[in-house]
Each structure stands twice: as C-alpha cells, then as structure tokens.
Image: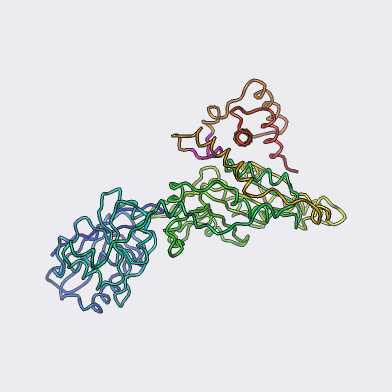
Amino acid sequence: MYSKVLSGGIHGIESYLAQVEVDASRGMPGFDMVGLLGSEVREARERVRVALKNTDFPLPVKRITVNISPADIRKEGAAFDLAIAVGILVSTEVLSEEILADTLFIGELGLNGEVKPVKGVLPIMIMAKEKGIGCCILPEENALEGAVIEGIKVVGVKTLEETIHYLQLEKEHRDQFLPPTLLDGQLLFSQNRKEQEPDFEDIRGQEMVKRAAVIAAAGFHHLLITGEPGTGKTMIARRIPSILPPLTMEESLEVSKIYSVSGLLKPGCPLVTGRPFLHPHHTISSQALIGGGRIPRPGMLSLSHRGVLFLDEFPEFGRENIESLRQPLEDKEVQIARSYASITYPADVMIVAAMNPCPCGFYPDRNRCHCTENEIKRYRNRISGPIYDRMDLSVEAKALTIEALQKGMPGQSSSKMRKQVMRARAMQEERYRGTGFLFNADLRAGDIERFCPLEKEEEAYMENLFVALGLSARAYHRLLKTARTIADLEESEKIRKKHLSEAAAFRIWES
C-alpha cells in the first residue's frame, strides 16, 4: 500500500514542505530510502525500524520503499523520523489514511520510541501556516516553539506510542487525550524577559565615546573604538545593548528563526525578545565567525542579526577573518556555496570593534610605548583600508585621570541615553514607513539623495569635506547616513553643517 505524509525540512534558515512517500509491497523483504539524503536521514532507517519494534509494531515482512521529495534538495537532520514511521504504519494499514489529511509530522525517534526535539521548528511552522496546513504534530519539547505561530494547531507528543494512540482516536476525542499547545506570542514578546544589562551610569568620563555610542545605536551604525588598555572600551561596548531600540515582532521572528535552526533557543523561551550581543574570542575560526562547515550552519555574524557583534582586540582576529567581513557588511547577508546548494544567511548587524593603537597599547606615549614604527605600522595594517572605510564611526577612548575616577560625577544613565535613541528611532520609523528600511544605516546608495537631501550650503560643505578627507564614494554615503542620524537625535528634519561636521569628525583616525 502507498501513503504520503507531510513533513518539513530546513534549507539555510528557510524551510520547505517535504513529502514522505512510503510504499509497502510484496517482494524480497527490505527497507530502502531515496531522495538525495544526508547521512542523518539515511540512518533513520534503523532508528525507525527499532523504534517501531520497541513500540510493539515490528516491520512486516514486506519490501518498504521510502522517498522524501523534492528530490533536488539535499535532506539533512533527523526531523523526518516521525513522518517515516507514521507513513509505514499507514502503508501497513495499522493507521487509517484519513489521519494524514492536513497534518504535518516532525520529530526524531529514539530507539525506545521516544520522540526527541529537533532544530528548525519555527521556520517550518511559518512555512506550514503559509501552505494552509491545519495541524502539526511535534516533539513535546518543541511544542512551545511551534505554538508561537498563531492560526495552526500544535500537538506535542512524547513517544511514538502516544502518537499512534492519538491518531487512532476519533477527531472529537483527540484534544481530550492530548490538548493542543497554546501560546500568546504577542504577550510573550511584550514581556521581554531580557536579563538586566550593565548601565552606562557606571562609566565616568569618555563623553566622546558615549556620544559615538548613542549615534551608533540610533542609526545602527558600525563603531570602532581605539585607545590604550584600561580606558573603558570594552565596558562601553558591553553597555550598547542597553540603549538600543527594542526588537519589533517581525525582527524577533527573523532572529528566532536563526537561533531555531542553530538549536540555540532556550528552553521555555521560544522567541528571542532582546537584541543579540555576541563577543567571540579572537581565536575564532572563519567558519564559526561567518558560517559554513560541511553541513552549513549560521556563524556568529548571523547569530548577531539585528543586534551587536563585538570584536574586542580587533587586529588579533587574523586578516582572513577580518577581510571575510567585507561583503557581509555591505550586503547584510552571508552566502555559502556548496556543490549541492547555495545558502544565504541574514547578517544585518552592528559591528562594534575595539583595538589598541599599537601592540603594547600605549602609543603615542613614548614614555611607556617602546614599539618601533614598523611594529606599529604592521599592527595597524592588520585592519585594511576597505574595512576602515566600512566603519561609520571611529572614536578614541582617552586615558582617565585619577581625579575623574575618584571624584568624577557618575555618567549619564542608559535610560536617559535610550530616550535620545528612541526619539531618533521614531523619526526613522516614520520616514521609512513602507520602504522596508528600519534604520539610517540600511539606506542604499540609490536612496541617499531621497532621504538625505542637502541644501546648497551643506552641498558646498560636503564638497570641501570630500576633498579634504579624501573620501571614497562609500565613505561619502556613510558620512551622509551618519549625519542623518545626528540630525534625528536633534529632531531636525534637515541635515545641517554642524551635523555633517560632527559626522566627519567621527570618520578621522590616525594613519
């Protein structure tokens, strides 16, 4: 007998509807699986066979063939196990074919029949809703994640035996046996369970760096902080999330999809409600930073999507890692090509980088710095010109005096700084309504003239800046976008000379 069961698979962070076709017929006993399958999917043959046996439904003496379509997409992971088992039970007439209508099955099977959680449930549920599927049967541990998507019935199961019993019941009695999992996604999102963050109030001095942080947060601009060791570069960077605008529901779903396919959603928290803040060690590999691997997975760059990726000791990351950021910083996505597929991961991140001025960290104080000119040059050259060009803001953290540390007034609190950011964010939200842009940093070169218009006096000033600073076309556009954010912070609809001047001041670094 032939049966067809709906399931879902992951391709990058997107999903696709998979059809698990099972045929049980007379002939030489066997169990074959086809459909461009990865090793984990091929191993499902043994997992399903033993799980059925231990659930008192051993495989019949028949020739069983399983095909997972579409055959042109490589299948990875163990999420098809439950669908294969259900398909076999329908093909051998243990279950009725009627139970397959409008139902999608996802789950990995243990040898004892346990239904184990899988990665990527959230994007599969989004796809299922788009396809009009009415019910999804998932592992119990994934049920909350699936219930985030409203308008679709989610049933969490613990074992294969429980699943079979549920499917054998009449429809009107199923909800009494296994009640659907319910979750108010909007309520969960609004509660925002983010942990308490460090506050800018703890930092004394460094007003220029704080100002740069506010501008970066308001427009989602990249920020480079230089300065000798102990001046507070890392402290400031770690406090930037406390002044960022909160995620919207749409952004939260985008980020949660990435964490779902990576298996990083926390138990009981099926949504990422706060902007990510990741700070990898400088020994990180290129694949871990950008993404990739034999079976491609999102890297820390994509895991920071809509949030902050903090690169402390920036020059120590190695030239290959630093240069690999070039294209993602422009395209806001990472493309990974394999012989069987090309996968795209989103990477719309704010890069915050911190570095010392020289290997020892004390240049230009020659009383403490003993680096040679060549050593300083080699150290700085680890950051290439194109990478510098992509940093919207560059600021120096000056060494603090003992008076500032002992008697200085507490810094401005994160809550006050965040109010400034939110006012600028409100202006951007109104300006870019219906355009797909969220922040000033999102603007493309072709949109600059429309959203960052200059009057004659400001145009002449920009011409002088372009020549005096030797700006590239990219740097020119980034300077305008930064000036647009500074104007927004002052609630000014027009970009003035003072806004351009401040933006230019944050693009100057020692060569």
Task: Say whether residue 443 is magenta.
Answer: yes
Identify the residue at image location x=43%, y=55%: 188
Tell me the quarter of the image containing the C terminus.
top right
Q: Which stretch did the figure color magenta? A: 437-444
- Find residue 244 and report its horizontal and vertical position in percent: 57, 47
In the image, farthest residue toward the right: 367
Whether residue 235 appears in this view of the structure is: yes
Tell me the quarter of the image containing the N terminus.
bottom left
In front of the other: 373 or 306 = 306
Q: Is residue 56 left or right of residue 9?
A: left
In front of the other: 37 or 48 = 48
- Find residue 4 and report its horizontal and vertical position in percent: 20, 59
Task: Say whether residue 290 is magenta.
Answer: no
Q: Quadrant of residue 505?
A: top right
Whether residue 10 appears in this view of the structure is: no
Q: Is residue 304 left or right of residue 260?
A: right
- Find residue 142 and report its horizontal and vertical position in percent: 36, 63
Q: Is residue 501 left or right of residue 151?
A: right
- Find residue 170 and report its horizontal and vertical position in percent: 16, 64
Identify the residue at image location x=30%, y=78%: 112
In front of the other: 504 or 372 = 504
Q: Is residue 45 above or below residue 128?
A: below
Q: Quadrant of residue 395?
A: top right
Q: Is residue 158 above or below residue 212?
A: below
Q: Is residue 38 above or below residue 428?
A: below
Q: Is residue 88 left or right of residue 202?
A: left
SS majority, magenta: loop
| Colour scheme | rainbow
Identify the residue at image location x=54%, y=35%: 427
